[in-house]
Amino acid sequence: MLLVSFNIEQIEEQWKEATFNGIRTFYKFYKSHFNGILQINIHNIFWFPVDTKDVIINYTIIRVLCYWFQLDYLPILCQPQYESLFFLNNLQFKKNQDNRVDFLIH
């Protein structure tokens, strides 16, 4: 079972839906790896209104979740809808002290 909550007071519906779609794509692909409930809490989303597209949010969510659970992201992200984003494969991740994942694009 997948539970998603957004702990953000104000979030545009477009980014909420894009985030949820990325989580749902990850979960559909890897749900056999989980027993019980997979609960994901979104605490913040940063975007740049000019550059950010829904597919970038999807891609990034999938990469973060695969990193967190140590699963290979390529089987999901080799799909045609993500081919234009392979330049994002240089994302680097780090875990914060409070067990959240930050990602940086270099």
Image (cartoon, rainbow, N blue to C red):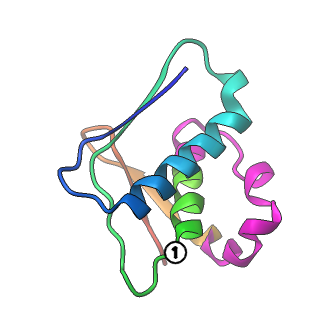
The residue carrying mark 1 is 53
- Choose between 32 and 90: the one closer to the eye: 32
51 to 28, vertically: above or below: below
Q: Nearer the viewer, residue 32 or 96?
A: 32
Q: Which residues are magenta?
A: 65-88
Decide whether residue 30 is among the magenta residues: no
Q: Residues within 10 Å of mark 1 (few under 14, many from 20)?
A: some
Q: Residue furthest top?
A: 36
Which of the 4 quarters of the picture holds residue 86?
bottom right
- Counting every numbered tag in the picture gives 1
**Relative vertical location of residue 39 with respect to residue 104 in this rendering, above or below:** above
- Frontmost residue, 54 versus 87: 54
At mark 1, the secondary structure is loop
- Residue 62 horizontal/vertical position (percent): 59, 51
Give, as a three-letter code, the residue at label 1: Lys
Quadrant occupied by the N terminus: top right
Residue 41 on image: x %, y %? 35, 37
Relative side of 82 to 7, left or right: right
Left or right for 88, reference 64: right
Task: Name the chief secondary structure element in magenta.
Answer: helix
Does residue 34 appear to the left or right of 4 in the view shown? right
Q: Is residue 106 above or below residue 79?
A: below
* Vertical position of residue 95 compared to residue 83: above or below: above
Task: Kindly indicate the quadrant of the structure image that contains residue 83.
Answer: bottom right
Q: Quadrant of residue 49?
A: bottom left
